[in-house]
Image (tube, rainbow, N blue to C red):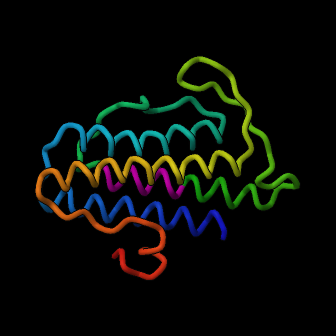
Amino acid sequence: MQLGTLLTFTYEANNALLDVITAHAVQDPEVHRLFSHVLNAQLRWLHRLRGEEASVGIWEDHDPAEWRDLNKTGIEGLRSVLDEAKQEPDGLDRIITYTAGNGKTYASSLEEVFTQLITHGAHHRGQIAMRLKGHGLTPPPTDYIFWSRKEVV
């Protein structure tokens, strides 16, 4: 499977969850914190991959009205980095060096970074879904298999 497909899945799964949160005007601070965190992680990795300073804090809260645009900006930027990497000799094996939130410097391949982004988002979408269930709401199915069968709109 290609990472580009998984980026599309991530984008659409985030939007499906966002649709439920906004349709029901969910005011749970933990839902807001987690969803902002997912988007922040996408943007922070994008900035690392581009060699830029992060424009957002990892736990920075955003107004839900900004979430859709932040999701689009992050995923489109990551797709651009992915497309550029495919043209490079090292491709997804290219190693990037970055400083993590703990101040330590690490090195990871692009493939590892993209895998982290995708699995990280899935983890937190699951946490958000549990919070929504606690409020009596039905979260959308955001597992990959549902999306691949076109059960996530």
In the shown orientation, is residue 35 left or right of residue 96?
Answer: left
Observer-nearest residue: 135 or 90? Answer: 135
In the shown orientation, is residue 83 left or right of residue 133?
Answer: right
The kind of secondary structure the magenta stretch mainly shows is: helix
Q: Quadrant of residue 102?
A: top right
In the shown orientation, is residue 52 left or right of residue 61?
Answer: right
Q: Quadrant of the N terminus?
A: bottom right
* Residue that lies at the very extreme toward the top in this rendered image: 103
Q: Residue at x 23, y 47 (%)?
A: 64
Residue 30 drawn above or below residue 146: above
Q: Residue at x 76, y 61 (%)?
A: 86
* Residue 82 x %, y %: 67, 57
Q: Quadrant of the C terminus?
A: bottom left
In the rendered structure, which segment of residues is drawn in magenta? 67-76
Residue 74 painted magenta: yes
In the shown orientation, is residue 79 left or right of residue 129?
Answer: right
* Residue 27 x %, y %: 13, 44
* Residue that lies at the very extreme toward the right in this rendered image: 89
* Residue that lies at the very extreme toward the bottom in this rendered image: 149
Observer-nearest residue: 110 or 78? Answer: 110
Count of marks placed on residues = 0
Residue 59 painted magenta: no
* Residue 112 x %, y %: 68, 47
